[in-house]
Amino acid sequence: MPIGPTTQPRNKGRRIAVVGGGISGLAAARRLLDLAPDVQVILLEARDRLGGVLRTEQRDGFLLEHGADNFITTPAWAVEFCQRLGMEEDLLETNSEHRRAFVVCKGKLRAIPAGFAVMAPSRICPIASTPILSMLGKLRMAAELFVPRRIVDESESLAGFVRRRFGYEMYERLVQPLIAGIYTGDPEQLSLGATMPRFRQMEEDHGSLIRAMWKQQKAQRTTAQQSSGARYSQFVAPRRGMSAFVQAIVERLDEAAVLLDSLVARMTPTAQAGWRLTIGGEYSRSLDVDGVILATPAQHSSTLLKSVDSESANAFGKIHYGSCAIVSMGFRREQIGHALDGFGLVVPAIEGRKILSTSFSSIKYAGRAPEGHVLLRAFVGGACQSELLNLDGQQLERMVREELADLLAIRGEPSLCHIVRQNNAMPQYYVGHEGIVRRIEQRAELLPNLALAGNALHGIGVPNCIHTGELAAESLLAKLSQSRHPRDQRQYPFRSASIG
């Protein structure tokens, strides 16, 4: 498949441009080809490679990820996408021997109680016996069964919701570090409805999160007993890393024109509800298309829409992003005193440490480190410790090494250190995000032959990105089917759906 700035679009009828070659844009392009093979798809990426933040590097036998290193299996959007790509057999499940994680509690690692799901417990005995919470903290948590139901509005933060239902101690000791590990964000600012809507729904439906979790556990056991076929662990990863996943998609875009080093600097409406894209950079030129899928970060989307629709541009401009550094370190196994009998650790803010979390990557998945070695992946910065991102590489390495040495009883120097800075890469769904997204999507519906995808709107994980990309493809084809065009008036198959 030709990939490069000189690739020329072929004359196949209607043209659709997908702007942004991250996982959302790739999924959108693939879905367009599946549903409308007679449409010409043009994928435009500003950088010299595809995949966005998903990137894998091999060094000295270690498999190093620049961004996400796995994806969740529920919802099954990513797993089903892999099945359609024919790479189902390449998915690794997590190590069944060590499916647990730790939290730092008063300087020591304690196992997170079994059955604790980010914001609520599903089992009584593990939470009752944990040393992480005091007796008063446990009693307050148990009292959640009697906390009155409240119809939650969109102004409630994650932190406010958890404290209201479970109290301060469970929030500070368990929920805050888990949320920071997922979003690298501040739960005081993050919107409950935009980040964890299912927990809000649990309160509305059952009056208690604990009660809802019990019912959910029972239903899952019944389903597991009655179901047949392959079942996955909660998380999976491509055997050769996330770049292999990206490459598997790229190899199935042979009917698309893929233009790298092609920054779209401007988009303007044309006659017959089309768009003219001005592509900057070394190969500056204009491209006329019949429809556009925007799968770009919020700030870029805001810039492109500014001359088209100021309201949607302003709304996109209100979406915040966070930054972090990922410090991967390789050690010989005998250097580490801790048993590493888990997948990683998270650190509460009240512990006053300088890392957010650490993944035991080579424990979690096979093939991430050479024989006799361990790969650890620490996260630094985020919304609550952004000043640490001002440190240079040597300072970051020294700081993380000292933290890990203390927590995991590590002796000596790492055999490898790899630092990636993800600047403004993680959308932060602050309180008010739901209203922002509604406004963006309302305005987008009024714009001709335009659809939106990406993690700025609905969910930060790989499955969510894939889902928004596929829904954007279906939405755009629906719009095109309803518009007249002299070159093509055929109807395209699509499933009626809103974006997100």
Image (cartoon, helix red, strand yellow):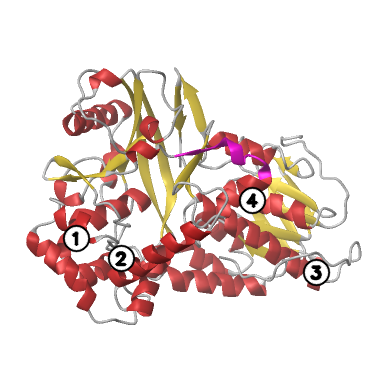
Q: Decide which of 26, 228 is in the foreground and name it.
A: 228
Q: Give the label on residue 158, or none.
A: 2
Which residue is tagged 4? 27
Query: Considering only vertical position in the picture, is 31 above or below 397?
Result: below
Q: Give the label on residue 223, or none.
A: none
User: Is residue 279 toward the left or the right of residue 290 in the image?
Assistant: left
Seen as rendered, the residue at the extreme front is: 225
Local crowd at mark 4 within 10 Å, few (<14), some, or many (≥20)?
many
- Can residue 383 be seen in the rendering of this structure? no
Element marked by disc 1: helix
Q: Earlier in the sequence, mark 1 or mark 3?
A: 1
In the image, the segment drawn in magenta is 85-93
Seen as rendered, the residue at the extreme right is: 486
- Can residue 471 be seen in the rendering of this structure? yes
Find residue 338 and report its horizontal and vertical position in percent. Answer: 21, 29
Which residue is tagged 1? 170
Q: Decide which of 498, 48 is in the foreground and name it.
A: 498
Image point (32%, 28%), residue name: 393
